[in-house]
């Protein structure tokens, strides 16, 4: 396997990192006030981030998966706004990917250009108050009526819900079939009966609004059903492979930036007459951070390689999701400890990564669920 970057990939990585660095002004305020900045989202769209690997016919860049992940990782290095980078990755892998894979030509022509150019923000509506890890026990119902469906239900903990213009909503069309009776729908914000909550206050990723989606006798035209009726479970599992594989791509870039910041601080900060990096307790933490980063990159790009070859990767996706989430959390704790009191104070903007990383062991399937998936594929 060739681990080198092409000239074009190097240029793409450099451009993505440099662009990301332009988005950091005012981040401390946005984080403290839990502000989602749509103008920054639009700038990311104008840069082409949301369309990296999507069809040029819809305004995308037409890149291969490896180049796409390289750009998203580099963006995460430059952009310290983990909420923004997570939102971009979330929309790409949980909205645009199922639309590309399961949508018909009309649906793709209607929605994909807007998702890519930033005029449409998408949310993924699966989780409900009574069905989190047990996703397929959802209670949202879609009743077939003349010309479409009437949806009733409540989705919760939905990333970008308060800001979304379009939601991919999973609902049961045949409750008696359990998970095999679930269908998916593209629901626009202005559909009657569709509403969202205010953003929920949370520990980290505050620039990425999290909220609820309420569906009250919401009529959805039949042409807005995504895929055939009853394939929602297969669609969800397929899209989750992509999401679990790559939703942390930019966070890997954050880990790389953390490492460089910690090395620089350990070289310049002195105690007891020497740089703190000379103390084994500090240098060992940095060595651990490097190891976690390296193994995270290997898993991430192995998945890109597998996806480019259309190889099955469900277990590998769960492994990557688990490892990257746990490593970002561990590295963020180490970074905070290396910086000492400075790392704990918000004014130095080190502890924010720690708060942002904490959610990664929960969303997109908890770390425990990922372990269960891995175990199942191992025959346990």
Image (cartoon, rainbow, N blue to C red):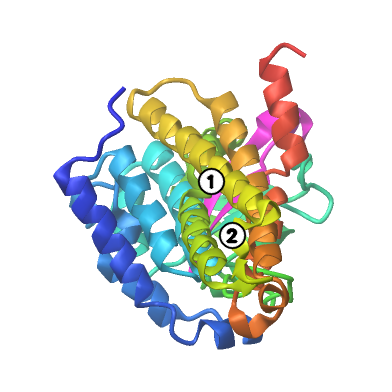
Q: Which residues are magenta?
A: 165-186
Task: Look at the image and tell me whether residue 118 can be seen.
Answer: no
- Does residue 175 belong to the magenta stretch? yes
Q: Please give left or right for residue 316 compared with residue 107 in the image.
A: right
Q: Please give left or right for residue 60 compared with residue 135 in the image.
A: left
In this view, the residue in front, 137 or 175, is 137
- Quarter of the image for residue 322 reads top right
Count of numbered badges drawn on the protein: 2
How far from the left and from the top, in percent, is residue 35?
57, 83
Residue, x 23% and y 54% (percent of image)?
Answer: 12
How far from the left and from the top, in percent, is residue 145?
60, 50
- Does residue 56 belong to the magenta stretch? no
In this view, the residue in front, 150 or 161, is 161
Foreground: disc 1 or disc 2: 2
- Quarter of the image for residue 366 reads top right
Q: Residue furthest front?
A: 273
Q: Which residue is mark 1?
A: 290
Check the image and report above or below for 102 versus 334: above
Counting residues from the start of the chain, the first of labels 1 and 2 encountered is: 2
Secondary element under disc 2, as helix, strand or loop, is helix
Q: Which residue is mark 2?
A: 277
Residue, x 35% and y 41% (percent of image)?
Answer: 104
Task: Look at the image and tell me whether residue 130 can be seen.
Answer: yes
Residue, x 67% and y 51% (percent of image)?
Answer: 280
In this view, the residue in front, 130 or 44, is 44
Q: Please give left or right for residue 37 compared with residue 361 in the image.
A: left
Count neighbours of disc 2 (C-alpha within 10 A) and say few if under 14, some if 14 to 19, many if 20 or more: many
| Distance between the alpha carbons at the discs numbered 1 and 2 | 14 Å
**Quadrant showing the C terminus:** top right
Secondary element under disc 1, as helix, strand or loop, is helix
């Amino acid at each position: 396997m060739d681990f080198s970057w092409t000239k074009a990939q190097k240029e793409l990585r450099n451009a993505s990192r440099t662009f990301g660095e332009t988005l950091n002004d005012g981040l401390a305020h946005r984080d403290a006030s839990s502000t989602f900045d749509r103008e920054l989202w639009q700038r990311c769209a104008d840069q082409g981030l949301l369309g990296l690997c999507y069809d040029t016919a819809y305004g995308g860049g037409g890149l291969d998966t490896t180049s796409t992940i390289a750009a998203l990782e580099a963006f995460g290095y430059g952009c310290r706004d983990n909420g923004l980078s997570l939102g971009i990755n979330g929309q790409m892998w949980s909205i645009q990917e199922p639309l590309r894979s399961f949508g018909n030509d009309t649906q793709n022509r209607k929605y994909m250009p807007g998702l890519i150019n930033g005029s449409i923000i998408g949310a993924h509506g699966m989780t409900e108050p009574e069905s989190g890890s047990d996703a397929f026990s959802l209670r949202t119902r879609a009743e077939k009526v003349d010309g479409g469906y009437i949806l009733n239900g409540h989705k919760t903990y939905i990333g970008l819900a308060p800001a979304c213009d379009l939601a991919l909503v999973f609902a049961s069309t045949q409750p008696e079939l359990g998970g095999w009776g679930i269908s998916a729908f593209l629901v626009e914000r202005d559909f009657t009966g569709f509403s969202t909550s205010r953003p929920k206050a949370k520990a980290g990723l505050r620039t990425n609004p999290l909220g609820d989606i309420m569906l009250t006798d919401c009529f959805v035209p039949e042409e807005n059903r995504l895929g055939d009726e009853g394939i929602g479970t297969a669609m969800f599992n397929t899209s989750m492979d992509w999401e679990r594989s790559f939703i942390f791509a930019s966070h890997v870039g954050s880990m790389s930036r953390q490492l460089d910041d910690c090395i620089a601080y350990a070289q310049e900060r002195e105690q007891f007459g020497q740089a703190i990096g000379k103390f084994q307790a500090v240098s060992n933490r940095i060595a651990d951070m490097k190891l976690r980063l390296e193994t995270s990159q290997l898993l991430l790009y192995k998945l890109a390689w597998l996806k480019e070859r259309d190889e099955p990767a469900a277990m590998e996706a769960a492994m990557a999701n688990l490892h990257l989430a746990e490593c970002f959390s561990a590295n963020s704790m180490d970074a905070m400890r290396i910086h000492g009191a400075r790392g704990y104070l918000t004014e130095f903007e080190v502890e924010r990564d720690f708060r942002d990383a904490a959610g990664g062991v929960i969303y997109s399937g908890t770390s425990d669920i990922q372990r269960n998936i891995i175990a199942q594929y191992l025959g346990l």
